[in-house]
Amino acid sequence: MWTREDIRREVAEAFRPDPPKPKPTPEEKAQEHWRSNKPGEVYAEQAASSLEAFARVVETETAESRRQKAMTREITEWNEAGKDPAVRYQRELDRIAQANLDLKAALELEDEYVEIGGFRERRYGKSFHRAKGDPDYGS
């Protein structure tokens, strides 16, 4: 059976910090320093490994090859989706609607009206209106 003293001792031991590690001697510090890689060597190793990885990526994947892969994937998805009759029907409707919009736009270029802010206004209309604020009013 646990007594209060046993519990307190166990808790105190659990929270007691570990004894500090002995400090290394100057001789041990020197040996560790000489054994480890110098910073320049570390940077050179990292640069060499990253250049090798970069060379592998450049060899296998260029911007042109990535673009070609993406285009192939998109064309495949387009063709797969086109097998569905509903998708084919919607594409046909979209094509017809776009052709209709293109025709309207072509016809409006010949029209002397243009739509601005939801209102049709004359494109190049000349006005002979004169008001009190005009410089030629009353002449």
Image: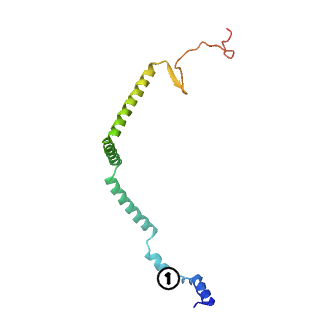
The answer to whether 92 is drawn above or below residue 41 in the figure is above
Front residue of this view, candidates 61 and 51:
61
User: Judging from the image, what secondary structure is the residue with disc 1 in?
Assistant: helix
Front residue of this view, candidates 39 and 108:
108
Q: Quadrant of the N terminus?
A: bottom right
Front residue of this view, candidates 62 and 81:
81
The residue that appears at 45% across and 70% down in the rendered structure is 38
Q: Residues within 10 Å of mark 1 (few under 14, many from 20)?
A: few
Q: Amino acid at mark 1?
A: Glu
Q: Is residue 34 left or right of residue 135?
A: left
The residue that appears at 43% across and 24% down in the rendered structure is 104
Q: Quadrant of the C terminus?
A: top right
Q: Quadrant of residue 13?
A: bottom right
Looking at the image, the residue that sits furthest to the front is 86
The answer to whether 66 is drawn above or below residue 117 in the figure is below
In percent of width and height, residue 21 lies at 54, 83
Front residue of this view, candidates 135 and 52:
135
In percent of width and height, residue 60 lies at 31, 54
The answer to whether 116 is drawn above or below residue 57 in the figure is above
Which residue matches tag 1? 27
In percent of width and height, residue 57 lies at 35, 55
